[in-house]
Structures are given as structure tokens and as C-alpha cells.
Image (spheres, rainbow, N blue to C red):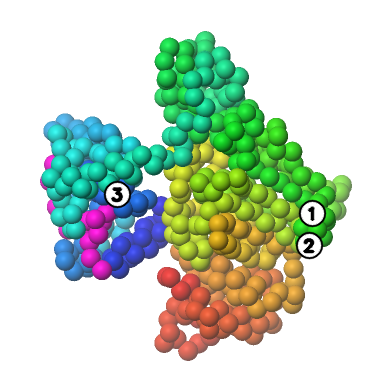
Amino acid sequence: MTDLSLRSRLENLLALPQETEWVEFKHNYTDPEQIGEYLSALSNSAALHDQTRAWLVWGIRDGEHTVVGTTFRPRHEKVGNQNLEGWLTTKTYPRVDFRIHEFEYRPGLPVVVFEIIPCWHTPVRFGDHEFIRVGSTKRRLKDYPEKERELWQRFRRTPFERTVCMESVNGSRVLELIDYPALFELLALPLPEGRAGILEKMVQEKFITEAGQDCFDITNLGAILFAKKLADFDSLSRKAVRVISYKGRNRVQTIREMPVAKSKGYANGFEEVIRYINEQLPANEVLGQAFRREVRMYPEVAIRELVANALIHQDFSVVGDGPKVEIFEDRVEITNPGRPLIDTLRFVDEPPQSRNEHMAAMLRRMNICEERGSGIDKVLFEIEFHQLPAPEFRVTDQHTVAILYAAMHLARMDKPDRIRACYLHACLRRVSNDNMTNETLRTRLGLEEKDYPKASRIIREAIEVGLVKPHDPENRSRKHAKYLPFWA
């Protein structure tokens, strides 16, 4: 998370009408035991309320939601001879996954945020007790049996990655089904000597679970990432990535489709899928000093990031459908099952929320996707660098669609295209700690200095629909005016 995204997240939390059961504000409170109890209570409450995160925030005046800063420095705190973070980790069971963020909300107003992952299979205990939030109060879970029952009911809805997709498989068959050489290579782990060592590491990484002597269950995580053939797993065969090329601008005539019968898992097959997509993309011939070369119409970095996003953020509960890449004469559409968990207008600045956090974390370890929150930024940078039309993000009843458009002169763009380009440019400038101006927009759109009025008109159109706003509404000088996205 960047400082900018953390400030945006904090403002969203402060805008809540009161402390929720998954958010707690503190000023300088530093009692380690109490912090540990809050970790337990907030993790359990976030799971109970289907939240993707819980938040423990220091630097806020209690009851007022006012940022006043804090002197609390968790990374310098000690409990006995142990640092606070390590002590909290060892005192919680199962070990609660939390991340510490320290930043300045404004100069001189330091804030500390604990970003807490919800528990997913059993309530988190601190010391001898499990805790829960009741309204804005921390209580022992055992004192609220109705909440404990509901929490356990939610655990029965096990995350997709932890669900077993093939039961009671002997060790030899596991190694026939799972591409273990690629697994160890992508995770940068040494390949153990002998079958037993390989299987043991796969158990540790949650790709398989032990079901008896030389008997294992293969989890969805192991199969979806490292299957030699997804078709070997009935429940996952329809989740293979489909790549379809069409003639023209519609779906009337298919040119070719990547065969899915031999599709590999998402991790061991990722480079193969990206290579196939790039081979189908239109290319322009560029004459160099000594030779000709082909340049693909769309930057590979943008394709990689959007395909990775489609894999990570899909809703696996949508039966019979998987990620899809469709290549047309004038655009590329990348579709994944499931509606996004955040507004498409906030894809740039809001930290992404994934339904499949374990898979996302694993793909980040393998450098297949970007660190949290930087993927869409990179897509926009590449699109602007190549001066392509702004990408579009659409939501249907059950899908999320990212669209990359082929090169198009500004004169051919309609009003929504121009406004979208202006808004996303303002977003990219903002998350880069800068502001949009008439000059930066002209550069983005390939306009000359004499086209100043065209850029001004586009900015005005974006302001009229509420996507962009002046940085300083009192400034009457358009020449030096700066602009922000509406959320800044």
C-alpha cells in the first residue's frame, strides 16, 4: 500500500458513521495484551461480517473520528526481549495474519494502521480466550453463543483455495497430476531429493493435504495453479483460460481459439498463455536503421497485468465459466466471472480486494502479478506511454470486463472516450503524487501546444460529469490550473 492509498483508506474508515465491529480507533493506547485481544476480536468479527479486512488504527481521537496523530511506534515496541509484532504473532492461534502500516496523514500527524486478515477456518484466540466485537465493545466470544454459532457456520463455507478438488490420491499419482518441477522453480525453492520431500513441501504450501499413509487430497489451490492439465480435474476444467481471435469487430466469425483441453494451471501455464495472446495480436511493422521489426499493437505489460487480474479476482462460485481473452480488430476484451468488490472508478487508487487471497499471495510470490494495488497503475502508464485510448472497465450481471482499444486519433474518439482518458490520466497523476494540468493532458493525448483549447474542453467535460475537479476552485487562471480526480 502506498501512503496515498493508505490515506484514502483511512478517510473511508473515518467516514463510517461509528466504529464498526471490524474497525477500532485508538490514540496512543499501547497495552500489548489489549492489542492482542483486539487482533483476535477484529479478525473474528471481520469473518463474521464477510469483510475482506479488519482495521486497528492509532492516531484518532476517540469518539470524534478526528486525526490527531500518535506517538505509538509498534516496530520499536518490546514485550520482554521480543519485539511487539513477533510477540503478538506467537500469542495468537491460529496465527493471525496482519500487516503494520506507518505513515503521515498530514505533515506532523503520524498514523499507525494494523491491516488484519479475517480468520477463515477457526476463531482466532489470543492467549487463552477468543474475542469478538459487539457493537464497538470487545467481548469474549464464549459469552455470545449466537455469534459463535454463526461464525462456525461461516467457516463451513471454506475458501475456494482450501477446498479439496480430488480426494484420496497416492503420492505417485499426485506427482503425475501436478507439475511439481514448475512449482519449485516458480517459488524459487530447491527441489528436494526423493518423492517424500517433494510431497512434504507441497503439504506445507497447502497444495495438497495428508489423508492417510501415502494418501493425499489435492486442493483447488494446488490444481488451479499447477495442474499439468486442468481437464484432469472435473470441477476445474471449465476454469481454463480461453483465448479467442475474431475476424473484424464482432463475434460472428472466429479465426482461431487456443485449445483448452491441454490447458495447464494458471502459474505453470501463465507464460504460455501470454505468449499465445501476443502471437494473435495485430502488429505494426517498424523500420529501424538496419532492419524491420514487428511491434505489437498493445503493450505486453498491460496484457500481462490484466490477464493476471482476471485470474486472481474471478468468482469461482460462478459455475461453468472461466477467464476469457477475446481479440478483435479494434480491441481486446479480458473477462472474468464475478462482479468486482470495489467500484471500477476506484480501480486505480483503492487497494484491490480479492475473493481468492491465498491464490493472489501465491502468484505475488512467483512474480506473476504485481504487489497489491500497483497493477492497474502499471497498465495505465503503459497505455499512456504508447498513446493508446484509455482502457475501459465494465461490469455485467456476473462478469467484469477490461477492454484495451487499438490506436485511435483523438478526432475519432467520442465524448465518453475523451472523458475516460481525462479521468484516468488524472488518477494516474494523483497516485504518482502529482496533478493533471492542461499541458500533461495534451502530452497524454498527443496534442500540440496550439491545441490548448481542445484539452480545456475535455477537462471541462470531465468536470461537468463529476469525474474531475479543480485542485484550487478559487484559482481563475486556467493556464496554471491543476486538476484532481473526484475522490482526491
Q: Is residue 485 left or right of residue 179?
A: left
Distance (Cα) linking label 2 and label 3: 46 Å
The one nearer the camera, 208 or 4, is 208
Whether the magenta-drawn stretch holds residue 18 is answered as: yes
Q: Which residue is mark 3?
A: 48
Magenta-highlighted residues: 17-36
Q: Which residue is mark 1?
A: 246
Q: Is residue 61 above or below residue 83?
A: below
| Percent position of residue 118, x then y | 32, 45
**Mark 1 residue element:** strand
Amino acid tagged 1 = Tyr
Quadrant containing the C terminus is: bottom left
Residue in the image at 49% along x and 24% along y: 167
Q: Residue furthest top?
A: 194
**Are discs 3 and 1 less than 8 Å apart at CB?**
no
Whether the magenta-drawn stretch holds residue 311 is answered as: no
Disc number placed over residue 249 in the picture, else none: 2
Amino acid tagged 2 = Arg
Few, some or many residues within 10 Å of mark 3 (<14, 14–19, 20+): many
**Mark 3 residue element:** helix
Q: Is residue 125 left or right of residue 251?
A: left
**Mark 2 residue element:** loop
Residue in the image at 40% along x and 60% along y: 4
Residue in the image at 27% along x and 54% along y: 22
Hey, which quadrant is residue 3 in on the image? bottom left
Q: Residue furthest bottom?
A: 476
| Percent position of residue 226, x then y | 57, 30
Distance (Cα) linking label 2 and label 1: 7 Å
Residue in the image at 50% along x and 34% along y: 220
